[in-house]
Image (cartoon, grey):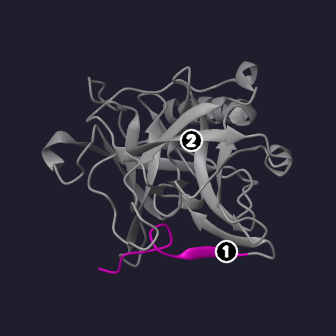
Amino acid sequence: MFIHCDLLILTLVLTLDGRVHAGKIIGGSEAVPHSRPYMVLVERNWNNGSKAFCGGFLLNEDFVMTAAHCQASSYKISLGAHDVSKKNEIQIISVDQAFPRRDYNPANFRNDIMVLKLSSKARFSENVKPIALAGKGDANLPKSCSTSGWGATEKIKMYMSSVLREINVTLVDNEDCARANLYCAEGEAGVGHGDSGGPLVCEDKKAYGVVSTRFIPKSLSSAIQRFTQIPDQRSWIDSTMMKALKNYNN
């Protein structure tokens, strides 16, 4: 089987200002097992038999959130995982329908967010719990945040981590990011290939952002990690879930 590699090893975009890569955790450490019960692994499948993986997070018993650039022909969601090789500990649910933002722009990753409707309800447990989302009232720039995922752990390696890893990030006040409705952090440690779609979780334990891209501008020596802002997307998120459930129940 051919493994689709756009999130694991491939440089996605060359721009005039630098390079953009999809997200992975570079640096950081192994998370305490099941300390982030909202985390999910999104398996992406294509009709030609290829597959790849993204991160994601559980919104409620019916929906998962991930990045819009994680679109595929079909999906399987793994819930309750820490070590993804231990299949007996994991709930696996297929996706009934995907809802990427219709105005997602793959050229610059603007509005890089997607909601996935599960084909059956997630079974909550100590290892499977949803995370609250930041709202419009949480729009001020948070400082101390973290992100997590199963992506490759070093820039030169191509393989996923079998265990969930996490890293703390500090957001910066960046005018370009603010204009694009993004949160940004600087530094080589953080996101790169493989963990797109995971949550940016801040001091109040709410999800403030969705891991999008790692941007390497020519003018800077360090990378910029970029996260789609959830407070800016709340109206779309809530209406998308409401419409999906209404159509499903009719």
Of the numbered discs in the image, which one, if any, rests on residue 169?
2
Q: Amino acid at mark 2?
A: Val
Residue interval drawn in magenta: 1-14
Above-or-below relation of 156 to 102: below
Q: In x, y percent, where is residue 222?
A: 65, 61
Q: Secondary structure at mark 2?
A: strand
Packing grade of label 2 (10 A; few <14, some 14-19, many >=20) is many
Q: Is residue 8 left or right of residue 2?
A: right
- State the separation of the CA atoms marked 1 and 2: 24 Å
Q: In x, y percent, where is residue 161?
A: 31, 58
Residue 8: in magenta span: yes
Q: In x, y percent, where is residue 104?
A: 72, 56
Residue 186: in magenta span: no
Instruction: Please tell me which residue lies in front, 143 or 236.
Output: 143
Q: Quadrant of residue 5?
A: bottom left
Classify the position of the C terminus by image quarter: top right
Q: In x, y percent, where is residue 62?
A: 44, 32
Q: Secondary structure at mark 1?
A: strand
Q: Is residue 192 left or right of residue 112?
A: left
Which residue lies at the image location 50% right of the left edge and 72% below the top edge? 6
Q: Quadrant of residue 53?
A: bottom left
Badge 1 or badge 2: first in the primary sequence: 1
Q: Amino acid at mark 1?
A: Val
Which residue lies under the disc numbered 1?
13
Which residue lies at the image location 31% right of the left edge and 25% below the top edge? 124
